[in-house]
Image (cartoon, helix red, strand yellow):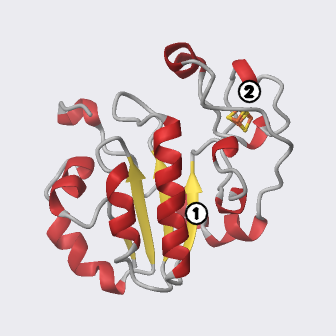
């Protein structure tokens, strides 16, 4: 069973989901074998609590939101994602992260799922990892500067990780649409 769950509390989950779905989703969590979490500004501080409550043995994908004003600063979200991922792994979950720049994953690139390469400038332009990386787009670099990312050596993504988390790419869980919901943050 796949569930899309964004927090272990109703308010942040419902905010990200854009609907009051927490009670129904939470009721299914104990049976979940796959969990997808969208990481936005509003719920990135909820990830650790979630990691401590997801069922042992489940697959958990933390998908960083990278579109629009609900997207968090990369350097703020990445450590929280990695901390939650580490705790979840210690509890026996299998964890993947998606859309986090590879240089912000440090030694944890084995968690990464493939990204669609973007036209990126700054430190990304000559980075050996850029073809596999969810690098910040030019608008992000213009707004916040290039200091959050740093070129790194080439990265070989784990094929087994991609096979295990192929379900994430099946487009069954599109990001909640903030434009439709008329909200921000
Ligand atoms: S510097 Fe390299 S690893 Fe970092 S975001 Fe840019 S392309 Fe990715």
Provide the secondary structure element on which disc 1 rests: strand
Which residue does the numbered mark 2 point to in the structure image? 124
Q: Ligand 1 lies in which image quarter?
A: top right
Provide the secondary structure element on which disc 2 rests: helix
Q: Position of residue 78 (x, y in %)?
A: 53, 47
Return the residue nearer the eye: 102 or 106: 106
Which residue does the numbered mark 1 point to in the structure image? 96
Quarter of the figure with residue 153 = top right
Mark 1 packing: few (<14 Cα in 10 Å), some, or many (20+)? many
Q: Does residue 173 appear in this view?
A: no
The residue positioned farthest toward the top in the image shown? 142
Does label 2 point to a residue whose CB lies under 8 Å from ligand 1? yes
Q: Which quarter of the image is occupied by the C terminus?
A: top left
Return the residue nearer the eye: 33 or 100: 100
Going from N to C along the chain, the mark reached first, 1 or 2, is 1
Q: Position of residue 98 (x, y in %)?
A: 57, 52
Q: Residue at x 69, y 23 (%)?
A: 119
Total number of numbered labels?
A: 2
180 horizontally vs 32: left or right: left
Quarter of the figure with residue 8 = bottom left
Q: Residue at x 62, y 25 (%)?
A: 147
Q: Is residue 174 above or below residue 72?
A: below
Instruction: Tell whether label 2 touches label 1 (CB within 8 Å).
Output: no
181 horizontally vs 86: left or right: left
Q: Does residue 65 appear in this view?
A: yes
């Amino acid at each position: 069973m796949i569930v899309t769950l964004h927090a272990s509390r109703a308010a942040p989950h419902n905010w990200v989901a854009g609907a009051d779905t927490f009670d129904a989703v939470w009721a299914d969590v104990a049976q979940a074998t796959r969990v997808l979490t969208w990481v936005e500004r509003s719920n990135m501080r909820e990830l650790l609590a979630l990691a401590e409550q997801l069922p042992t043995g489940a697959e958990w994908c933390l998908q960083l939101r990278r579109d629009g004003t609900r997207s968090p600063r990369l350097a703020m979200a990445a450590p929280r994602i990695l901390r939650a991922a580490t705790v979840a792994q210690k509890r026996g979950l299998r964890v993947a992260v998606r859309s986090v720049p590879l240089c912000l994953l440090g030694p944890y690139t084995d968690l990464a799922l493939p990204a669609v390469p973007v036209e990126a400038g700054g430190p990304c332009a000559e980075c050996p990892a850029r073809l596999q990386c969810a690098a910040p787009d030019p608008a992000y670099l213009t707004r916040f500067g290039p200091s959050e990312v740093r070129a790194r050596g080439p990265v070989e993504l784990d094929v087994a990780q991609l096979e295990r988390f192929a379900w994430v790419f099946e487009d069954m869980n599109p990001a909640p649409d903030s434009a439709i919901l008329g909200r921000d943050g």
